[in-house]
Amino acid sequence: PPGVVFPIMWLLIIGPLRATSSTIIIESVGSYLSLPLMSLMLHLSCGDVWNTINNTEKRYGTSVLGISTVYFSALHAAYQYYEVDPLAGKLLGATAIWLTIASTLIIDTWRLNVDEKGEKQSLLPVKTIGEESVTGFSWGRKKEE
C-alpha cells in the first residue's frame, strides 16, 4: 500500500480498536490489572522490539521472525479479550488483518533485499566478527565528554 496508508491505519483504525476493546475489558473486569490487558501489553512490547529490529537496525531477516511474534501475540491477546467479552475480542482481533498485510510486506522486503553477494540476511540475529554490533543500548554506555 502507499505510504500514506500506514499512519491512517495506526492512528485512525488500530489505535481506536485497541482503546475501545480495552475499555470494554476494563469495564467488564473492573480492574486495570487482568490477564487480557497484560496479554495486550505483551503484544505491544513484542511490537516495540520488532520495530527496533526492523526500522532502526534494519535486520530484515530477523524482522521476519519478529513479525511472527507480533502476529501471534496479537492473536493471543484477542483470544484473551474474547474470553471476557466476545465483542472486545472481535475488535482487537480485527487488528490481525492489518498485521497479516504488514507480515506479507516484511517477508517480501526480506526476500527482495539481498546483499552484494546476492544473499538474503540471516533469519537469526548475527554479529559479524570484527564489526561493531548494530544493536545499541542507552544504558551502560560511557558518557562522551
Image: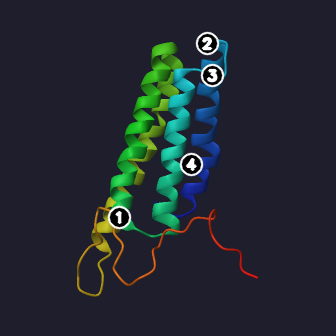
Closest to the observer, 8 or 49? 49
Q: Which residue is mark 4?
A: 9
Mark 3 neighbour density, 10 Å: few (under 14) some (14–19) many (20 or more): few
Per the model, the C-alpha gap separating discs 1 and 2 is 40 Å
**Mark 1 lies on residue:** 125
Mark 4 secondary-structure assignment: helix
Does the residue at mark 4 contact the one at mark 3 (Cβ under 8 Å)?
Answer: no
Give, as a three-letter code, the residue at label 4.
Answer: Met
Question: Which label's residue is closer to the chain start, 2 or 4?
Answer: 4
Instruction: State the CA–CA distance, disc 1 to disc 3.
Output: 34 Å
The answer to whether mark 1 and mark 2 are in CB contact below 8 A is: no
Q: Residues within 10 Å of mark 4 (few under 14, many from 20)?
A: some
Q: Quadrant of the C terminus?
A: bottom right
User: Of helix, strand and loop, which one carries label 3?
Assistant: loop
Q: Is residue 26 above or below residue 53?
A: above
Q: Nearer the viewer, mark 4 or mark 3?
A: 3
